[in-house]
Image (spheres, helix red, strand yellow):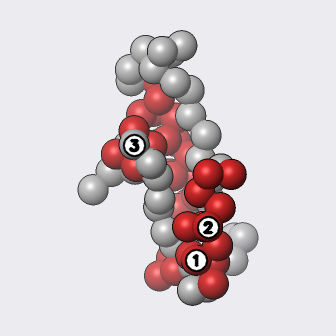
Amino acid sequence: MAKFRRQLQHLVLWWLQVFAVDYRLASEDPVPCPVEDVYAALSWLFEIDKTIGIDPTRRVIYGDSAGGGMRGP
């Protein structure tokens, strides 16, 4: 996360809500494990957004390399 500090600070300045999703790496756990981890985390987040005060219109899904690609279309 440290290498994305500047980008994430910009998102927060725009009042966007930022969440970090960690997932298993394919080098340790083969596909589809990493994709399933990301899907489970995002599904959970979308289910509880109103419970914890997340504004769905201000939600950002952000990632680098594989993490960005696994977030879906």
Judge the density around disc 3: few (<14), some (14-19), many (≥20) Cα neighbours within 10 Å: few
Residue 53 in the image: above or below residue 21: below
Q: Residue at x 33, y 51 (%)?
A: 72
Residue extending farthest to the left is 73
Disc 3 designates what residue? 65
Q: Residue at x 45, y 48 (%)?
A: 64
Judge the density around disc 1: few (<14), some (14-19), many (≥20) Cα neighbours within 10 Å: few
Residue 46 in the image: above or below residue 65: below
Residue 31: % across, % down:
38, 20
| Amino acid tagged 3 | Ser
| Amino acid tagged 2 | Arg
Residue 32 in the image: above or below residue 10: above
SS under mark 2: helix
Disc sitting over residue 6 in the figure: 2
> Disc 3, disc 2: CB below 8 Å?
no
Residue 50: % across, % down:
63, 74
Decide if residue 55 is in sight here. Answer: no
Residue 41: % across, % down:
56, 46
> Quick one: 24 or 43, which is closer to the camera?
24
Residue 58: % across, % down:
52, 80
Q: Nearer the viewer, mark 3 or mark 2?
A: 2
Decide if residue 71 is in sight here. Answer: yes
SS under mark 1: helix
> Disc 1, disc 2: CB below 8 Å?
yes
First-in-chain label (3 vs 1): 1
Disc 1 designates what residue? 10
| Amino acid tagged 1 | His
Judge the density around disc 2: few (<14), some (14-19), many (≥20) Cα neighbours within 10 Å: few
Disc sitting over residue 45 in the figure: none
Cα separation, mark 1 vs mark 2, equals: 6 Å
